[in-house]
Image (cartoon, rainbow, N blue to C red):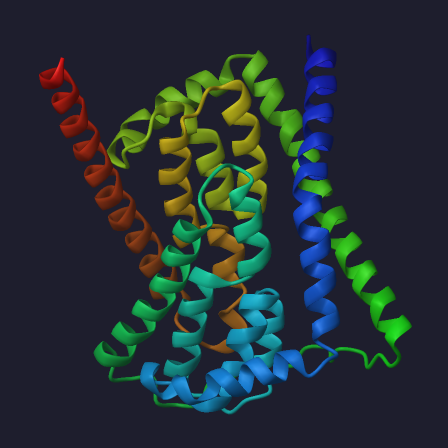
Amino acid sequence: MIVDSVKKGLLSGLNTTWSLGKVIFPVTLIVTVLQYTPVLPFIINLIAPLMNLIGLPGDAAIPLVLGNFLNLYAAIAGILTLDLTVKEVFIIATMLSFSHNLLIESGVAMKTGVKLWIILTVRIGLALLSAVVINLVWQGGSEMAQGVAIGETAEINGAGAILIHGVIQALSGIAQLAVIVIPLMVVVQIMKDLKWLEAFSKALAPFMKVLGMKPNASMPFVTGLTLGLAYGAGVMIQAAKEDNVSKKDMTIAFIFLVACHAVVEDTLIFIPLGIPVLPLLLIRLLTAIVLTMVVAYIWNRTDRVQRKEAVYEQ
């Protein structure tokens, strides 16, 4: 049985990698190439005047654009080029915790059937709201942030070299995805066949119920929470096909995950910058829990009202 489970898991992992890779490759290629054109500097200059509204200097637009178009590592590289206070870095870190890698992760989330406007509204809305609240509430953090230097990006000249670099970066992104997703799918398949996943879902049932989801959404939920949106999406795509996870539960799960995913990596990565990471983690967790519970309550209430109206009409 284990051999069959491994075969099914490998096939599922390859199919998922192919599906998500079709999103990751073009987006990574385009954004990588844009780094070597006037486009990203233009966007940064466009956003800079708006920074003061959320308590940030104009040049803070650099890590925000890099983080949203690329990833947290690119954003941190941008932060290390600036003179920022602890409060300013904390605001940037909180914003990017909600809205980093926006293009790829939003595209991946759409593969599960979640609407793009929901993803963007939640992620960008939470990023802006968190910045405003932190700026108004926190009166400390005026000391300069301390960071550690990281390697500089190698200079690349020539259209051909830039294009090749973009293709390599895109393929590398897919390879990194495959290294995690394929073994993960094998493990998930084995857990399913051994009935461990069913037991795991039952154990999480009370928490899933509080968040307004059914127990069969537990595995993709936990995967996204610990490993990230892309890998959570891979498991969720499979769960939607095999476990009949409803579109409603997928949407609610992703509302939680877009607010709080990859909690270990996305939190620890900011430690070298000298900001308080525990409050950062708590902000993400509490925001995700409250937001998800509110959305699920409104959704369930609306469904009940519609069902009652349908009964009365009959």
Q: Picture quarter containing residue 293?
A: top left
Query: Taking 71 as reference, is 221 above or below it?
Result: above
> In the displayed structure, would residue 158 be above or below residue 165?
below
Q: Quadrant of the N terminus?
A: top right
Give the residue displayed 32% in from the left and 68% down from the top.
130
Q: Residue furthest front?
A: 313
In this rendered view, identify the residue nearer to me: 283 or 241: 241
> Could one spot residue 225 in this view of the protein?
yes
How many numbered badges does the structure rendering display?
0
- Tell me the residue at 52%/45% (across/down): 109
What residue is at 74 percent from the left and 18 percent from the top? 7
Residue in the foreground of this view, choosing between 66 and 264: 66
Which part of the image, by quadrant, shows the C terminus?
top left
x and y percent of residue 207 in the render? 29, 33
| Occupied quadrant, residue 185 | top right
Note whether residue 79 is visible. no
Residue 176: give x, y in percent of width and height: 72, 49
Q: Residue at x 58, y 12 (%)?
A: 193
